[in-house]
Image (cartoon, rainbow, N blue to C red):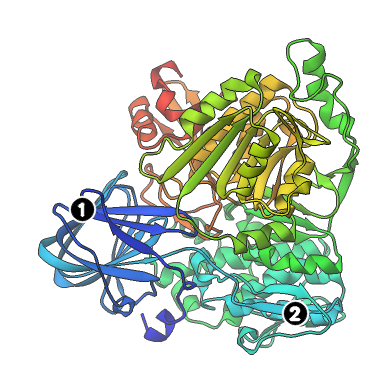
C-alpha cells in the first residue's frame, strides 16, 4: 500500500487510555468519549509503557509497549495481518488459524476501539467466536495502539440564508473525507462534515475547502433542491453550484438528476448505488475480503473491479451509474436513515449532522394525525377495565399537532420540523450540538427514579438488569419517591442515562411533594433518557433544550401494563448496546400502546457497547426438524453505514445495517449459535432472550 494512500487515513485527536488490569496480567484500553472498553490479557504481569504512535502505519490516538509471549482478546473480532509496509498478508475471522514465520507484523483487531498490534516475531493467530489469541513464540516487545471511532466536525462554516451561499457552505462538506478512494465507504474514513451556522455573511475557512475531486453538481438555488442533494455532495467530495437543470458533471461525464421518478428519488438512488459499488470495489484495496455482496453482483455486472479500483472517482462514478438501479436493488444493504426536513433557512444548521449519517434527506410529505387516533389502542384496553394509566383515568387528548411521515424503506425515520411525528424520531439541531459539547467521563452512570410505588415491577427489573455486564464500568443508582428538590438535583447532575418511572402531565414530573417542570431548569447533566410516563413529550423536549442528547418519550397517556412491557424490553435492549431508536423500534412491538412512544433528539445514542460487532435481533421459525434463523443488525453511536460483519454460520463477510440472508440450522447448530451471546429473539411475535430459550421447546 503506497504511503500516499495511508496518509489519508486518520481520526480526530482523542485520548485513548491504557491501564493495567486489576491483577496486572493484561491491559485495559478505554475510549472515554464513546465509553468503549477493550481488554488484552497476557499470561504474565505486564507494565504498559507509553510510546510514539508513529510506529504504526495507520494513525492511532495513543499507544503503549508491553513485553509478553501472548495477547488474548476475550471477545470475537476480525483480524487483519499486514507486513510492515501495510500490505495485507492474511485475514482471520470466525473460527480460523494462521501461522506466520519470523517477521515484522502489524495486526489490526476490529473491536469497539480500533486496535493495532505490531511485533517482530513469529506469529500465530487463533480465532473463535468468543476470543482471539496472538502468540509470538517467545517474549517480545509488542506495540499496542488504539484509535477511537469518535469524529468531531473539522470546523464551522458560516452562511447567510441566501441559497447560493448555502450551496458554497455545503460544498465544504467533502473536506471532511479522509480519502476519496472507495474506502471512504468505511464509516471510519468519512470525517464529520463541518458544522454550519447562519450569519450575516458567507465564510468558509481555507482548510475547509472542497475536496477537489473534479465533480460538480448543479441544482436550482432553492432549499427544496439544496437540502436533499447535500449527502451526495459530501460523499462525492463535489462542488455544489447553481444550475437550471439538476445534474452531475464529472470529467466530461454527465448524469441527470431530474428523472421521471423525481429529483429526490434520483438523488437517493445515485447515493445508494455509488456507496454500494464502493463497498464492493474496495475489496481490491486495503481489505481484500470475501464479501457476500460482491459475490452477488459479479454475475449481474461485467466490471473489472481490480482495474476500477485504480481509476479516478469520476470514472468510477460513470461506471457505477451505467448499471440500471433495478439490477442491483435487491443486493443493497438496508439504508440506515431517511430524514424529512422542512425547507427553511434555519434547518441548514441541522444538515451536517444528517449528512454525517449519510441520511437520505427529503422535503416533508406527511398526513396529520389526530391524538384520538393514536390513542385508540389505549382507550380500548382501558375501557375493558383491565388496567390503569400512568396519568389520569380520563385519557385527555394532547393539544399538540401530530404528523405521520410518508413510509420509507429505511430502518429509521427522522422528522425535522415543528410538529410531533408519529412513527419517526423528532430531531433538533440543539440535540446534536449537545452531543458535541458533552464532557467525557469514561464511566457509564445510570440513574433510575421510580416515583410511584405501584410501578415497582419495572423498577426492580431496571435495578437488576442495568449494569449486569461485569466487563463494563457501570455505576447504577436507583431512587424511590423523590421530592421536587431531589429530582432537580438528579437531573442537574452528570449521568449518561436517566430512566424515569412514574407520572408526568402538563405541569411536569410528579414528585412526593409536588411537580417539577423541567422547562424551569437552565441546564441538565442527563445525556440520554427514557421517560416511561404519560404525556412525557414536552418534558423530554425540555430536557433536550437544557442539554440532553436524546431520549424516549410518550405522545399521550399510556396504559400501565403496556408501559411496563415497553419499559422492560427497553431496559434489556439498551443494556445490550442497542441505540435508542433501535431499542424502541423493537420494544414498541411488545405492546398495543407501542405507537404512543417516540424518540426525541439524537436517536443514535447508545448506553453501552455491544458484545459483538453490532447489535443483533434474531427471528426463529421451526421448519420441521430444522430451524430458519433470520438476523437483523442495528448500528448506532459512532458506527455507520459501510461496516462489515461475519456471522458464525458463514465463511463470508456481509455489509452491516439491516437484514442478513436467512440460514437453516439443525437443533444442535442453533443451540450452539444462541450460546455465543445473549441476544433478543422474536419467536411467534414474542420477544425472548437466547439465554432463556430451550431449543427443544420451540
Is mark 1 in CB contact (under 8 Å) with mark 2? no
From the viewer's perspective, tell me whether residue 434 is left or right of residue 118. right
Q: Quadrant of residue 166?
A: bottom right
Residue at 81%, 61% in the rendered image: 261
Q: Residue at x 62, y 25 (%)?
A: 565
Q: Residue at x 85, y 64 (%)?
A: 343
The secondary element bearing badge 1 is classed as loop
Q: Quadrant of residue 79?
A: bottom left
Q: How many marks?
A: 2
Residue that lies at the very extreme toward the top in this rendered image: 385
Q: Which residue is mark 2?
A: 158
Q: Indicate the quadrant containing the N terminus: top left, top right, bottom left or bottom right.
A: bottom left
How many C-alpha atoms fall within 10 Å of the one at disc 1: few (<14), some, or many (≥20)?
A: some
Mark found first going from the N terminus, 1 or 2: 1
Q: Nearer the viewer, residue 632 or 303?
A: 632
**31 to the left or right of 567:** left
How far, Cα to Cα, is label 1 from label 2? Answer: 50 Å
Closest to the observer, 562 or 340: 562
Q: Position of residue 476 (x, y in %)?
A: 48, 38
Residue 522 horizontal/vertical position (percent): 73, 54
Q: Quadrant of residue 402?
A: top right
Farthest left residue? 138
Mark 2 packing: few (<14 Cα in 10 Å), some, or many (20+)?
many
Foreground: disc 1 or disc 2: 1
Query: What residue do we see at 56% from left, 50% from top?
Result: 494
**Does residue 25 appear in the picture of this structure?**
yes
Kindly identify which residue carries mark 1.
24
Mark 2: secondary structure:
strand
Give x and y (percent) for residue 639.
52, 57
Res 285 label: none
**Is residue 584 shown left or right of residue 503?**
left
Frontmost residue, 197 versus 228:
197
Amino acid at each position: 500500500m503506497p504511503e500516499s494512500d495511508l496518509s489519508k487515513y486518520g481520526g480526530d485527536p482523542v485520548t485513548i487510555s491504557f491501564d493495567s488490569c486489576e491483577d496486572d496480567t493484561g491491559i485495559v484500553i478505554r475510549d472515554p468519549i464513546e465509553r468503549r472498553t477493550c481488554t488484552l490479557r497476557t499470561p504474565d504481569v505486564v507494565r504498559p509503557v507509553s510510546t510514539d504512535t508513529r510506529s504504526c502505519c495507520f494513525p492511532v490516538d495513543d499507544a503503549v509497549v508491553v513485553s509478553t509471549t501472548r495477547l488474548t482478546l476475550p471477545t470475537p473480532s476480525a483480524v487483519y495481518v499486514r507486513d510492515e509496509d501495510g500490505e495485507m498478508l492474511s485475514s482471520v475471522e470466525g473460527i480460523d488459524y494462521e501461522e506466520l514465520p519470523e517477521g515484522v507484523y502489524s495486526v489490526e483487531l476490529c473491536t469497539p476501539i480500533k486496535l493495532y498490534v505490531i511485533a517482530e516475531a513469529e506469529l500465530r493467530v487463533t480465532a473463535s467466536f468468543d476470543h482471539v489469541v496472538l502468540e509470538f513464540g517467545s517474549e517480545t516487545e509488542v506495540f499496542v495502539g488504539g484509535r477511537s471511532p469518535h469524529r468531531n466536525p473539522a470546523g464551522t462554516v458560516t452562511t447567510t440564508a441566501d441559497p447560493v451561499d448555502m450551496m458554497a457552505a455545503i460544498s465544504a462538506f467533502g473536506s471532511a473525507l479522509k480519502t476519496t478512494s472507495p474506502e471512504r465507504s468505511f464509516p471510519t474514513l468519512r470525517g464529520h462534515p463541518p458544522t454550519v451556522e447562519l450569519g450575516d455573511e458567507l465564510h468558509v475557512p481555507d482548510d475547509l475547502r472542497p475536496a477537489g475531486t473534479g465533480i460538480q453538481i448543479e441544482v436550482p438555488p432553492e432549499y427544496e433542491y439544496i437540502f436533499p442533494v447535500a449527502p451526495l455532495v459530501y460523499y462525492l467530495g463535489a462542488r455544489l453550484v447553481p444550475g437550471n437543470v439538476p445534474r452531475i458533471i464529472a470529467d466530461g461525464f454527465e448524469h441527470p438528476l431530474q428523472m421521471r421518478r423525481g429529483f429526490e428519488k434520483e438523488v437517493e438512488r445515485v447515493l445508494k448505488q455509488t456507496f454500494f459499488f464502493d463497498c464492493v470495489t474496495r475489496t481490491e484495496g486495503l481489505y481484500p475480503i470475501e464479501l457476500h455482496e460482491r459475490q452477488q453482483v459479479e454475475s449481474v455486472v461485467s466490471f473489472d473491479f481490480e482495474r476500477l479500483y485504480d481509476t479516478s472517482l469520476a470514472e468510477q462514478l460513470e461506471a457505477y451509474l451505467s448499471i440500471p438501479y433495478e439490477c442491483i436493488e435487491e443486493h443493497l444493504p438496508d439504508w440506515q436513515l431517511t430524514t424529512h426536513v422542512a425547507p427553511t433557512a434555519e434547518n441548514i444548521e441541522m444538515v451536517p449532522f444528517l449528512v454525517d449519517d449519510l441520511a437520505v434527506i427529503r422535503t416533508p410529505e406527511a398526513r396529520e394525525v389526530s391524538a384520538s387516533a393514536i390513542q385508540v389502542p389505549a382507550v380500548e384496553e382501558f375501557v375493558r377495565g383491565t388496567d390503569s394509566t400512568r396519568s389520569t383515568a380520563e385519557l385527555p387528548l394532547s393539544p399538540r399537532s401530530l404528523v405521520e411521515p410518508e413510509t420509507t424503506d429505511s430502518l429509521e425515520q427522522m422528522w425535522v420540523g415543528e410538529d410531533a411525528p408519529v412513527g419517526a424520531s423528532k430531531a433538533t439541531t440543539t440535540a446534536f450540538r449537545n452531543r458535541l459539547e458533552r464532557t467525557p467521563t469514561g464511566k457509564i452512570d445510570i440513574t433510575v427514579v421510580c416515583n410511584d410505588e405501584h410501578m415497582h415491577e419495572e423498577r426492580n427489573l431496571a435495578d437488576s438488569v442495568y449494569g449486569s455486564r461485569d466487563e463494563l464500568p457501570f455505576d447504577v443508582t436507583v431512587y424511590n419517591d423523590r421530592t421536587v428538590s431531589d429530582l432537580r438535583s438528579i437531573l442537574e447532575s452528570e449521568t449518561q442515562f436517566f430512566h424515569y418511572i412514574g407520572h408526568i402531565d402538563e405541569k411536569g414530573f410528579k414528585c412526593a411533594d409536588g411537580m417539577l417542570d423541567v422547562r424551569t431548569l437552565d441546564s441538565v447533566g442527563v445525556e440520554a433518557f427514557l421517560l416511561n410516563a404519560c404525556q412525557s413529550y414536552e418534558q423530554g423536549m425540555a430536557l433536550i433544550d437544557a442539554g440532553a442528547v436524546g431520549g424516549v418519550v410518550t405522545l399521550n397517556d399510556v396504559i400501565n401494563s403496556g408501559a411496563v412491557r415497553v419499559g422492560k424490553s427497553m431496559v434489556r435492549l439498551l443494556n445490550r448496546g442497542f441505540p435508542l431508536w433501535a431499542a424502541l423500534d423493537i420494544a414498541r412491538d411488545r405492546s398495543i400502546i407501542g405507537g404512543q412512544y417516540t424518540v426525541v433528539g439524537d436517536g443514535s445514542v447508545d448506553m453501552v457497547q455491544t458484545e459483538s460487532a453490532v447489535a443483533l435481533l434474531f427471528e426463529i421459525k421451526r421448519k420441521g426438524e430444522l430451524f430458519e434463523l433470520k438476523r437483523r443488525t442495528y448500528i448506532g453511536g459512532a458506527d455507520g453505514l459501510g461496516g462489515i460483519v461475519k456471522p458464525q454460520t458463514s465463511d463470508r463477510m456481509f455489509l452491516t445495517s439491516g437484514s442478513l440472508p436467512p440460514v437453516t440450522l439443525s437443533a444442535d447448530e442453533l443451540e450452539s449459535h444462541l450460546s455465543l451471546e445473549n441476544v433478543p429473539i422474536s419467536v411467534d411475535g414474542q420477544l425472548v432472550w437466547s439465554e432463556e430459550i430451550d431449543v427443544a421447546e420451540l
